[in-house]
Structures are given as C-alpha cells and as structure tokens.
Image (spheres, rainbow, N blue to C red):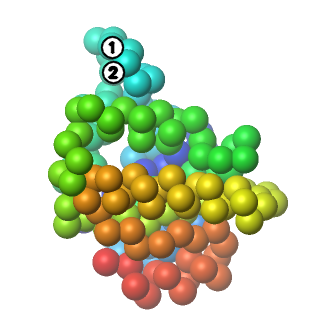
Amino acid sequence: MILFINGSPNKDGNTARLARELIGDRPYEQLNLAEHKVYGYGQSYGDDDFEDVLARIEAADTLVVGSPVYWHNLSGMLRNLLDRFYGPVREGSMSGKTLYFVFQGGAPTREMLDWGEYTMKRFAALYGMTYGGMVDNTHEARALSKKLA
C-alpha cells in the first residue's frame, strides 16, 4: 500500500499534484498532516494524533512524503512529524519500506533542494527505509514513477 503524507496545508495543492504525478495510476491513501494534531517533540497533550499517524505509516509499504519549500526548507508540519519519530520509533524499525520525496516550490535554489533531500535521506536511513529518490518537478516525477515500488 502506498501512503502519501502531505506536508502542505493545501490538501489538493501543488505538492499533492506533484505526488499524483509520481504515484501515477497506482492506488494510494493520502494523509494530510494539516488535518492532524501532531505536537512538537517533547510535548504531551491528550488530543495528539501522532500515534494514529504513525499507525498509518507503519501499515504502508511505500511512503511518498511531500512538502512545499517553506522558509528554504521543509514545511513545519513535516519537520514536526520527523522530530516526533525520535524516541518512540526504534531505529531500523521501518525496514522493508521505500520512501520517495516530493519537494516543490516556486523557485527553490539547488541548496534548498539539497538540504531537504539530505534530511529525508537521513530520516529514511535512520529508520531502515530504502530511499527511492526525490522529485521537484513534473518531468522528474514521471521519470521516477516508472521505478516506484
């Protein structure tokens, strides 16, 4: 099962559109982080949805993680989710999954794209996932779609 984790506040915006280009005609589920309360690392509130989000991630075979370029890097919602993995999620415990990264923005510099990809590569490696690659435009999404697990 493919799970698209949308780190954009727009559930059907440019990030979701580019993810659909990557996923192609394959069935998938979309998890919009804007619709879930995932509090910051170290915070504990009764209405936190991290465990529910984590359960959906654990159920997936393939993750397509998407973010717009905000303030030269990942969106805060996505960054928050990544931070929350530290501690409750055991290193290597996502072995067998493949992670693809969709990172788009109006005019990101090469450095911005490299920083975002570095973060996602490290995240995938830490939790045992295979990193499938990053796309930041439609042409790349269509090319990588042929390799999508």
Closer to us: 141 or 72 = 72
With respect to residue 102, does 137 lie above or below?
A: below
Q: Determine crowd level at label 1: few under 14, some 14-19, many 20+ residues with C-alpha closer than 10 A.
A: few
Per the image, label 1 sits on a secondary structure element best described as loop
Crowding near the residue tagged with mark 2, few <14, some 14–19, many ≥20 C-alpha atoms within 10 Å: some
State the image coordinates of residue 123 (x, y, percent, origin top left).
40, 52
Residue 29 visible in the snapshot: no
Classify residue 12 as left or right of residue 113: left
- Viewer-proximal residue, 105 or 34? 105
Name above or below for residue 83 compared with residue 15.
Answer: above
Q: Residue at x 45, y 43 (%)?
A: 32
Measured from the top left, where is residue 144 in percent x and y?
49, 82
Residue 44 tag number? 1
Q: For the residues labelled 1 and 2, say whether their Cβ atoms are less than 8 Å apart.
A: yes
Quadrant of residue 2 within the rendered picture: bottom left
In the image, what residue occupies the spot 62% across and 55% down?
Answer: 115
Report whether 13 appears left or right of 97: right
Q: Please report the residue visible at 32 percent of the width from the left and 53 percent of the height from the top.
A: 126
State the image quarter where residue 147 is shown.
bottom left
